[in-house]
């Protein structure tokens, strides 16, 4: 259960910031697939908020990576370790400081940045621990979200962001423009970016132009500048 | 147990008791942490399953404080089933159809390995307190000699709970290239002040028993049963949890309808503890209890590495090559989850390969010995994953006995 999967939000899953992601091995969600495509085969990968290990399993068996994971929910950790993945129970916001600089080739944070208490500090750790960081997040500047707020005057609830305001684990939404600006501010280089629309089609490579309006989520490959 | 024995077993160790014995440190005595030397000495051990052709499927089980090498055998003294039948055996997570399982009695112990109750060849009398103080690292040194004696260069896995988990950690630190994966369960990187305190209570109970005779009770023909039983009773409480004690006993009275207004075992929990104490003294040596609790007290992995635990897991300037799976139990207050987590953090600090799971249970520290399906599934999954990486793919059936 990622902070975005809210088809049937229960108190349990709503509070699990980085719960198990949906999806079975080898048949992974398109946004996870796009992340996987950014990873070089045989590299060292840390997947933060690895959920039930779908991406990690795909990377380990499909691309021969040396993969590790951190997962907050015990249920997710158990599912990962039971399938032989190297996953620890831990909290990204307290545990990332332990890792040495450059320990991994890629550090992945998928659909979780907006649920962090201190996204800026987490981003800083990502580009410190990994040679590359791969970050994906929902775009709050997406036109349907803008329109909902404009027309109804209420906090947007969409298919992907299915939580009511009082139950959402997503406490730090940003738009693609906001994110790009933060990266610039922190001296983080954006190596590649992909913007996905509602049906997970790539609407844009790069992050300029209308992507902030048309994209429902962004996937960014980052590097310390 | 129709386990086939490896070809490397000494033919001379036929005995009434199941298992094998080997003399080690014969050519060169073993140097102990204390600076003293021990040797030659005996290690009693048991094996299950078959060692494969390239000797890559060996699993070493490390037993806890009062455990022994009878993992699957009926205990020769108590007649009880093997202590880890829940986890180890054909088709179990530590699958004896697939792995060659070794478990040895620790040195300082009292089930066949050299310890304070054995005869000191120098004097012809039981060692008693003249037995050298041993450490967890010394126990592991002796196990390493045994593993070499069995012709095994690298263990596929070292696994154990409690004091066994301390040995697992020590193995990974002392011999990182001789261990493919390590599973320290309900363990800690050092013995806490509270745990040392509990051990001291136990030791004082033994030493306060007049039958202890300054440690020479074997010569005096007595046994400090009362002291050892009290030590066991106190320790046994620490292996359980408040919730488990309440669930099992509550305030239920033992074979009576009302309070006796005396000091009989009015409550079931008292009767239970007394039984634990009395049955323990039949199978355990009081001096061994002193020595082994001391070994646990002295355990501090970081101490030899500038008090930085992470440095213990560096090997040749890199992260330890050992793959770890740490397991803790939510209601264990003797070796709480925070202890396992401190090891995880140290392993993260060198970017080692580590899995870590806390199992939700009310059974306390003893949970690692009990029927905990979630725990067993985690161990199974971790070992499967490691076996794949080690190239131990096909599940082997043991040849018919």
Image (spheres, helix red, strand yellow):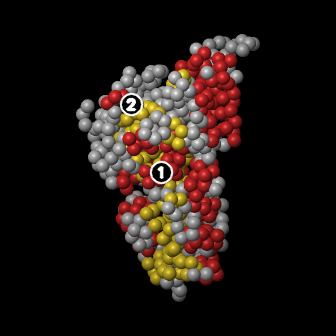
The CA distance from mark 1 to mark 2 is: 24 Å
- Residue B134 against residue A105 in the figure, above or below: above
Q: Residue at x 47, y 66 (%)?
A: A45
Q: Residue at x 57, y 64 (%)?
A: A99
* Residue bearing mark 2: B20
Mark 1 vs mark 2: tell me if same chain.
yes
* Residue bearing mark 1: B175
**Residue A213 at least partly seen:** no
The answer to which of B233 and B270 lies nearer the viewer is B233
Q: Which of the marked residues, 1 or 2, is nearer the chain's N terminus? A: 2
Quadrant into which the C terminus of chain B falls: top left
Q: Quadrant of residue B253?
A: top right
Q: Position of residue A143 (x, y in %)?
A: 55, 78
Q: Residue at x 50, y 55 (%)?
A: B354
Q: Position of residue B384 (x, y in %)?
A: 38, 49
Does A7 sit left or right of B308 as displayed?
left
Q: What SS does tag 1 mark?
A: loop
Q: What SS does tag 2 mark?
A: strand
């Amino acid at each position: 259960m990622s902070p975005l999967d809210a088809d049937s939000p229960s108190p349990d899953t709503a509070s699990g910031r980085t719960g198990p992601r949906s999806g079975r091995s080898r048949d992974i969600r398109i946004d996870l697939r796009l992340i996987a495509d950014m990873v070089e085969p045989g590299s060292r990968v840390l997947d933060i908020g690895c959920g039930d290990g779908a991406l990690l399993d795909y990377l380990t068996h499909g691309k021969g990576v040396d993969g590790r994971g951190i997962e907050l929910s015990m249920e997710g950790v158990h599912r990962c370790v039971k399938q032989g993945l190297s996953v620890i129970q831990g909290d990204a916001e307290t545990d990332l400081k332990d890792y040495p600089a450059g320990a991994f080739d890629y550090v992945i944070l998928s659909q979780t940045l907006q649920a962090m208490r201190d996204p800026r500090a987490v981003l800083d750790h990502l580009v410190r621990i990994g040679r590359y960081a791969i970050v994906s997040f929902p775009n709050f500047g997406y036109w349907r979200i803008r329109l909902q707020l404009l027309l109804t005057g209420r906090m947007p609830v969409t298919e992907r962001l299915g939580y009511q305001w009082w139950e959402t684990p997503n406490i730090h939404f940003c738009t693609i423009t906001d994110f790009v600006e933060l990266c610039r501010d922190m001296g983080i280089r954006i190596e590649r970016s992909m913007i996905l629309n509602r049906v997970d089609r790539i609407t844009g490579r790069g992050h300029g132009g209308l992507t902030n309006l048309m994209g429902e989520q962004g996937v960014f490959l980052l590097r310390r500048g | 147990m129709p386990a086939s024995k490896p070809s490397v077993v000494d033919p001379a160790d036929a005995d009434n008791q199941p298992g094998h014995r080997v003399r080690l440190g014969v050519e060169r005595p073993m140097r102990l942490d204390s600076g003293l030397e021990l040797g030659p000495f005996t290690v009693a051990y048991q094996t299950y399953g078959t060692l494969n052709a390239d000797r890559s499927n060996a699993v070493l089980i490390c037993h806890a404080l009062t455990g022994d090498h009878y993992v699957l055998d009926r205990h020769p003294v108590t007649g009880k089933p093997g202590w880890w039948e829940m986890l180890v055996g054909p088709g179990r997570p530590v699958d004896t159809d697939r792995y060659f399982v070794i478990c040895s009695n620790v040195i300082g112990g009292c089930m066949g390995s050299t310890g304070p109750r054995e005869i000191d060849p120098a004097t012809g009398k039981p060692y008693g307190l003249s037995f050298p103080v041993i450490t967890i690292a010394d126990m592991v040194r002796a196990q390493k000699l045994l593993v070499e004696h069995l012709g095994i260069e690298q263990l596929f896995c070292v696994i154990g709970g409690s004091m066994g988990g301390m040995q697992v950690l020590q193995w990974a630190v002392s011999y990182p290239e001789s261990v493919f994966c390590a599973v320290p369960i309900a363990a800690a990187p050092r013995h806490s002040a509270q745990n040392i305190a509990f051990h001291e209570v136990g030791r004082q109970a033994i030493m306060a028993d007049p039958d202890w005779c300054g440690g020479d009770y074997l010569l005096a023909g007595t046994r400090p049963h009362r002291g050892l039983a009290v030590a066991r009773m106190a320790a046994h409480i620490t292996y359980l949890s408040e919730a488990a004690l309440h669930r099992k006993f509550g305030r239920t009275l033992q074979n009576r309808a009302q309070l006796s207004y005396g000091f009989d075992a009015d409550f079931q929990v008292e009767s239970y503890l007394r039984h634990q104490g009395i049955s323990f003294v039949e199978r355990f040596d009081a001096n061994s209890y002193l020595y082994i609790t001391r070994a646990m007290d002295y355990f501090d992995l970081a101490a030899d590495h500038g008090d930085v635990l992470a440095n213990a897991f560096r090997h040749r300037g890199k992260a330890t090559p050992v793959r770890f799976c740490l397991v803790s139990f939510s209601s264990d207050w003797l070796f709480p989850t925070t202890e396992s987590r401190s090891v995880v953090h140290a392993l993260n600090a060198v970017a080692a390969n580590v899995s870590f799971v806390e199992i939700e249970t009310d059974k306390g520290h003893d949970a690692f010995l009990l029927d905990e399906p979630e725990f067993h599934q985690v161990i199974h999954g971790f070992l499967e994953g490691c076996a794949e990486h080690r190239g131990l793919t096909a599940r082997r059936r043991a040849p018919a006995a």
